[in-house]
């Protein structure tokens, strides 16, 4: 199925429906209150990248919300696979959402949950070696006034539909036209982007804000740190100031869709990518290639 003649189909509440007909009731708590959990994933070669860590983080979000939906990881994975297959997609953006369902007229959630599951998929370019990045170019980053919500209010590890914090940060970028917001915590230390984790290189070490602060434990972030350790690159995880980032030798952002995106400027100050960013980007591509494309070729040869 080519993208030109395909009718995109989304999974909504047990059914695969055309994208332009996909809807949920206005009484759904995900719509009314942002009372829902989600994960953004990427599929390579028909297989979801690091499904288990994503499933674990989704379960943790649901625990934070006190939402016992009763769905197994295998069940959720099957719904993703079904949606990818229905759209003939092997390389794709995937968003999996679980809402608490419809409970109109009350803020306090009922203990019994009738969950609503939604899977959205969109085509992306092939990953791995010699792949084309999904971003247009190195990112321009701007420090914003909107502060990251403290963990004691809403834990950073919880990915919920209530994304107003990131939205307000992105709205601020309208003035400068920057690609990503650099968000600080209540004490003025760097945390992350609106939808990305931050890395930079200083004094020959790879630096990234510690998860002790209000920082999302990104799946791509974890892979990058593992790759850096395997290469013997010194790593510093602690609190950093905006000046630490502005003075960096190089810097980049990570998330599941972007993978590694170099940073061109921070607050108008040139940073740019460098040897560490290039090395880690290549290692990441090699990792994706081994995990998702070489195995597919091996399976194809074995079945001939």
Image (cartoon, grey):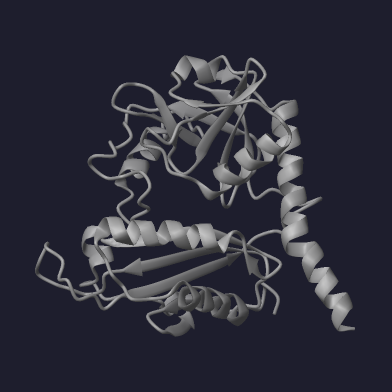
Q: Where is residue 32 in the image (x, y as percent from the top left)?
A: 21, 63
In the image, 89 versus 110, the foreground residue is: 110
In the image: residue 220, left or right of residue 104: right
Q: Which residue is drawn at 74% across and 48% down?
A: 285
Judge whether residue 96 can be spotted in this image.
yes
Q: Which residue is drawn at 70% across and 58% down?
A: 125
Quadrant position of residue 277: top right
Q: Which residue is drawn at 45% across and 21% down?
A: 240
Rendered position, 273 above or below 157: above
Report whether residue 182 is seen: no
Q: In this view, does 208 lie above or below 27?
A: above
Q: The N terminus appears in which quarter of the rendering? A: bottom right
Along the viewing direction, whichever of 90 and 37 lies nearer the viewer: 37
Q: In which quarter of the image is the C terminus?
A: bottom right
Asked where in the image residue 165 lies, by quadrant, the reply is top left
Above or below residue 178? Residue 131 is below
Total of numbered circles in the picture? 0
Residue drawn at 28 percent across, 55 percent down: 64
Residue 295: which quarter of the image? bottom right
Q: Position of residue 246 (x, y in %)?
A: 53, 17
Please provide percent x and percent y for residue 16.
48, 83
In the image, taking residue 253 as reference, residue 161 lies left or right, namely left
Q: Which of 186 and 52 is in front in this view?
A: 52
């Amino acid at each position: 199925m080519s993208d030109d003649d395909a009718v995109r189909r989304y999974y909504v509440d047990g059914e695969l429906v055309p994208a332009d007909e996909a809807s949920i009731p206005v009484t759904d708590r995900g719509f009314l209150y942002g009372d829902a959990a989600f994960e953004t994933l990427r599929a390579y070669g028909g297989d979801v990248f690091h499904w288990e860590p994503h499933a674990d983080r989704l379960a943790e979000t649901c625990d934070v919300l006190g939402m016992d939906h009763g769905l197994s990881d295998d069940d959720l994975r099957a719904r993703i696979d079904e949606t990818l297959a229905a759209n003939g997609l092997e390389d794709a953006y995937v968003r999996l959402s679980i809402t608490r369902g419809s409970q109109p007229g009350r803020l306090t959630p009922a203990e019994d949950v009738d969950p609503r599951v939604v899977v959205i998929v969109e085509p992306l370019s092939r990953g791995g070696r010699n792949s084309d990045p999904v971003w247009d170019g190195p990112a321009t980053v701007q420090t914003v006034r909107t502060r990251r919500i403290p963990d004691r209010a809403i834990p950073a590890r919880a990915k919920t539909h209530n994304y107003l914090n990131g939205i307000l940060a992105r709205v601020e970028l309208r003035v400068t036209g920057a690609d990503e917001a650099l968000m600080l915590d209540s004490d003025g230390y760097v945390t992350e982007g609106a939808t990305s984790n931050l890395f930079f290189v200083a004094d020959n070490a790879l630096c990234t804000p510690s998860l002790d602060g209000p920082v999302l434990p990104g799946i791509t972030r974890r892979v990058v740190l593992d790759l850096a350790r395997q290469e013997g690159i010194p790593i510093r995880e602690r609190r950093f100031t905006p000046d630490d980032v502005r003075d960096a030798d190089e810097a980049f952002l990570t998330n599941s869709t972007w993978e590694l995106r170099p940073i061109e400027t921070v607050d108008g100050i040139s940073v740019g990518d460098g040897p560490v960013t290039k090395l880690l980007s290549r290692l990441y591509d090699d990792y994706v290639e081994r995990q998702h494309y070489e195995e597919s070729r091996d399976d194809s040869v074995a079945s001939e």
